[in-house]
Image (spheres, helix red, strand yellow):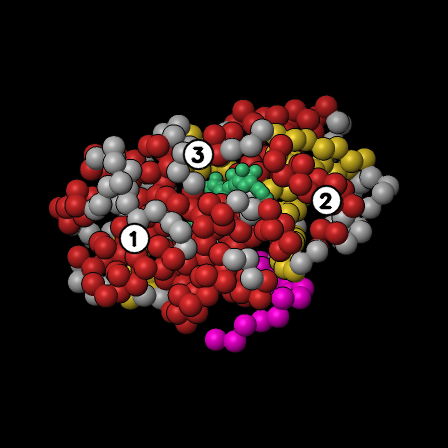
């Protein structure tokens, strides 16, 4: 597979009159007025968190025109803040500023900020414009694209939310220079996911590119981000509200969301839980006679090379998994629907996994 250049690159999420661009490249946030084309009016609020504000708020201000009614809201950091209380703080700030339906929210940060700001935008005065400016690898390859917005509930991940598309996604790849290695690995889990569900060539490329990606090599990162966004944009354009193929983007998430909720949001990073969940899905696929043991070892090796955990939490028993998994949003009536792998590079949704096979996998999967 040929690598694309590191310079600016634009993709489109094709959704008719709600289509929007994904701009990818180094230094995009530094371009004066670069966010101007997607503003709905003069009222603009940048929402970010304490960590990202210190690093990138000034740059984001510069990407906006001068003649605005500009407000800034800096929320606390962390997955544990992804709840209605913090979304309410966004609504409070919008009302206190007197913002109307022609306002625009700018989500500057990782997936937590993006999901909350998108949900705040979806509900404020029944829907206002928002722009995604993702600053983590995970947000750049996944959460900023596709319009899934929302918050967690103590009983389940992303249980309250809405589909609400951004007006644009601006990915400044320079922001990854400050990302802690653990967060980079978490983002790589979602990158690997695309290879596993839809693109065996990309998976093979990743197997050799992981050291370069972990070293933040610009060409490798640019290719990983562009290919991930292209695959996600294609799936979202086909199935915006997850009636069919979009569910494949949930590979590893039925297990992963159970881990995140059980462990208390933030103790396991989303990408870490998804990585372990993908290994569980691969093991289950092998038990159903689909993947070979060599395939499972390839999955284990690529996750290890990405620096992701390969064992489930020690204190999580079979019932801890099953009770959380029974609340999964993909389920129909009381039937579990799991994303599994008939082959590497090909995924399906399965609702016929025998309970005993699943329970045995959950029982025997390594704990750390
Ligand atoms: N909507 C979707 O389609 C979708 C897809 C995948 C994940 N998600 C959600 O995204 C969330 C995870 O996102 P995340 O992994 O970005 O986590 P995050 O938003 O918590 O960000 C991770 C950490 O990195 C910090 N950070 C952000 N940018 C930085 C930078 N450039 N330099 C240094 N530090 C930086 C943040 O402050 C935070 O501490 C989860 O809630 C998950 O459910 C949503
Ligand atoms: O965009 C999607 O669709 C996804 O499933 C992407 C996932 O990586 C992401 O974690 C998403 O938030 C999970 O959605 P959920 O519907 O399972 O909460
Ligand atoms: Zn995810």
Rendered position, 68 above or below 305: above
Secondary structure state at the residue bearing disc 1? helix
Q: CA distance from mark 2 to mark 3?
A: 26 Å
Contact? badges 1 and 3 (CB < 8 Å) = no
Checking the image for residue 266, the label placed there is: 3
Rendered position, 190 above or below 313: below
Badge 2 or badge 3: first in the primary sequence: 2
Mark 3 CB within 8 Å of ligand 1: yes
Residue lying at the far right of the rendered structure: 67
Q: Which residue is mark 1?
A: 279
* Marker count (numbered): 3
In depth, the one of 264 and 219 nearer the eye is 219
Q: Which residue is mark 2?
A: 60
Badge 1 or badge 2: first in the primary sequence: 2
> Is any atom of residue 307 visible in this view?
yes
Q: Position of residue 257 (x, y in %)?
A: 36, 40
Q: Give the residues drawn in magenta, as a range.
A: 1-17
Secondary structure state at the residue bearing disc 2? helix
Where residue 73 sits, quadrant-wise, is top right
């Amino acid at each position: 597979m040929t690598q694309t250049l590191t310079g600016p690159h634009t993709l489109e999420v094709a959704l008719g009159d709600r289509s929007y661009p994904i701009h990818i490249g180094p230094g995009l946030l530094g371009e004066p007025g670069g966010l101007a084309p997607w503003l709905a009016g003069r009222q603009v609020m940048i929402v970010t968190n304490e960590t990202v504000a210190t690093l990138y708020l000034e740059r984001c201000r510069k990407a906006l025109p001068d003649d605005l009614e500009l407000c800034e809201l800096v929320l606390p950091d962390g997955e544990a803040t992804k709840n209605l209380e913090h979304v309410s703080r966004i609504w409070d700030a919008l009302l206190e500023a007197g913002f109307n339906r022609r306002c625009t929210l700018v989500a500057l940060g990782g997936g937590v900020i993006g999901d909350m700001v998108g949900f705040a935008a979806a509900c404020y005065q029944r829907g206002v414009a928002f722009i995604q400016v993702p600053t983590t690898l995970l947000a750049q390859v996944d959460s900023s694209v596709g319009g899934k917005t929302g918050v967690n509930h103590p009983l389940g991940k992303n249980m309250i939310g809405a589909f609400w598309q951004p007006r644009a996604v601006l990915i400044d790849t320079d922001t990854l220079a400050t990302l802690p290695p653990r967060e980079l690995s978490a983002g790589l889990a979602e990158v690997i996911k695309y290879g596993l569900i839809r693109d065996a060539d990309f998976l093979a490329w990743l197997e050799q590119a992981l050291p370069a990606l972990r070293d933040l090599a610009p060409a490798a990162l640019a290719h990983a981000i562009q290919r991930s966004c292209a695959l996600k944009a294609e799936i979202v354009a086909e199935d915006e509200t997850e009636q069919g193929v979009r569910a494949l983007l949930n590979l590893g998430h039925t297990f992963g969301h159970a881990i995140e909720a059980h462990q208390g949001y933030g103790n396991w990073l989303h990408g870490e839980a998804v990585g372990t969940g993908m290994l569980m899905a691969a093991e289950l696929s092998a038990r159903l006679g689909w993947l070979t043991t060599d395939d499972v070892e390839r999955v284990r090796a690529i996750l290890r090379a990405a620096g992701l955990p390969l064992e489930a939490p020690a204190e999580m028993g079979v019932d801890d998994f099953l009770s959380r998994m029974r609340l999964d949003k993909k389920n129909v009536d009381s039937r579990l629907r799991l994303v599994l792998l008939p082959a590497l590079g090909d995924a399906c949704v399965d609702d016929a996994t025998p309970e005993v096979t699943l329970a045995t996998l959950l029982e025997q999967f390594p704990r750390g």
